[in-house]
Amino acid sequence: MKDLKNNIDAVNSIGPDDYTASINGLGIDLQGFEGSAVVFSVGTVTDGTHTPKVEESDDNSNWNDVTAVDQEGTLSDLSSDINQRVGYKGVKRYLRTVLTVSGATVGAQLAGLVLRGMPHREPVN
């Protein structure tokens, strides 16, 4: 079946906005899903350095960087109009996107999304 809509869920961890300062995104619960990925969707980067990363947690309170072993692909400093994505192979219950910003006065337009897939129950609402 080619139906992807009912088999994935996209949740904003960092909502779409203009960012001039670092931000920790919201923790996204992966319970009920067997797969996940993270997408940083970027509009215009006007100035500064915008470095993305992904963190994981068992309890949505204590966070650690996702290790290279549990991340499919790599992230690099964000630039205009280029989306970046990585897969998550770890076993923690929560994921969040993190953005570290330096040297920005106007900043960058972006969002950090967690994609949840392979749900235990379909369709995803």
Image (cartoon, helix red, strand yellow):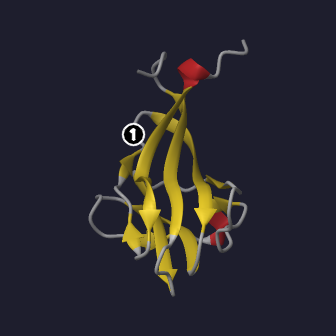
Against 51, residue 122 (above or below) is: above
* Residue drawn where x is 64% and y is 69% of the image: 78
Closer-to-camera residue (43/118): 43
Q: Quadrant of the C terminus?
A: top left
Q: Position of residue 41 (x, y in %)?
A: 59, 52
Tag 1 residue: 31
- Secondary structure of the residue carrying tag 1 is loop
* Residue drawn where x is 68% and y is 63% of the image: 80
* Residue drawn where x is 44% and y is 41% of the image: 11
* Residue drawn where x is 42% and y is 33% of the image: 32
Left or right side of 50 for 16? left
Which residue in the rendered view is the most extreme toward the bottom?
Answer: 103
Closer-to-camera residue (64/91): 64
Q: Quadrant of the N terminus?
A: top right
Determine crowd level at label 1: few under 14, some 14-19, many 20+ residues with C-alpha closer than 10 A: few
Quadrant in the picture for residue 60: bottom left
Can residue 65 be seen from the camera position used here? yes
Question: For the image shown, how many numbered marks are present on the structure?
Answer: 1
Q: Position of residue 7 (x, y in %)?
A: 56, 24
Residue type, mark 1 in image = Gln
Closer-to-camera residue (43/10): 43
Q: Position of residue 17 (x, y in %)?
A: 43, 56
Can residue 66 be seen from the camera position used here? no
Which residue in the rendered view is the most extreme toward the top?
Answer: 1
Quadrant in the picture for residue 72: bottom right
